[in-house]
Image (cartoon, rainbow, N blue to C red):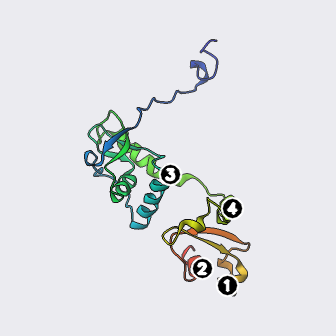
Amino acid sequence: MSRQGGAGGRGSGARRAVPMPSPVLLPLASLKSHPRNYRIHPPDQLAHLEESIRTHGFYRNVVASRDGTILVGHGVVMAAARLGMDEVPVITLDMDSTDPRALLLMAADNEIGRLAQTDNAALSKLLESLAKPGPESLRERGPRGPELFHLRPSQFGAQGRDAALLPQRPCVFLHPHPLPDPLSLARSLQ
């Protein structure tokens, strides 16, 4: 089979993926936060990351420059430290932490996810299925886990302008804390 005209060949315009090194367990003490990291990881997010690590392990790797400066995964490293872990899986790239490619990787990892759009109906169905009793139920997560809320417009007795803030059909959403007043949440999301 010729590579010239087929998929991935020179004539197709397809590009090959850049080979990535395999992750290696590295001591947390060998990693350092990137001085230009602009993301802040509040305690609520770290608690969710901790629960994810406890439940699922590391399904996304930390990425570091050759000197151990974290490019991707600052929050994961912080959560692992809070859990008392000594090491995490790390992909080490052969570049300096100041290399423009390293800075682009850090920014891209943080920002590309924001370009995605949420299909609220599909999310609602997914969360509905997780609310049912069973091994994957969010309701079984305990007091520190996220709360699942079922919002129905008729529940609130909202009138006038406030009624327009609420969903017009039932929906489900996830929130890390119990909500004292879902109408206040709807107002805050305006």
Residue contact at pointers 4 and 2, CB within 8 angstroms: no
* 3D distance between C-alphas at marks 1 and 2: 8 Å
Report the residue marked by disc 2. Answer: 182
Residue contact at pointers 1 and 2, CB within 8 angstroms: yes
Residue contact at pointers 4 and 3, CB within 8 angstroms: no
Report the residue marked by disc 3. Answer: 56
**Relative to 98, residue 3 above or below:** above
Residue type of the residue flagged with mark 4: Ser
Under circle 1, the secondary element is loop
Residue type of the residue flagged with mark 2: Pro
Residue type of the residue flagged with mark 3: His
Report the residue marked by disc 1. Answer: 156
Mark 2 or mark 3, earlier in chain = 3
* 3D distance between C-alphas at marks 4 and 1: 24 Å
Task: Please tell me which residue lies in front, 56 or 20.
Answer: 56
**Side of 53 relative to 32 (left or right):** right
* 3D distance between C-alphas at marks 4 and 2: 21 Å
At label 3, counting other C-alpha atoms closer than 10 Å, the crowd grade (few under 14, some 14-19, many 20 or more) is few
Res 102 quadrant in image:
top left
Residue contact at pointers 4 and 1, CB within 8 angstroms: no
Task: Please tell me which residue lies in front, 34 or 160.
Answer: 34
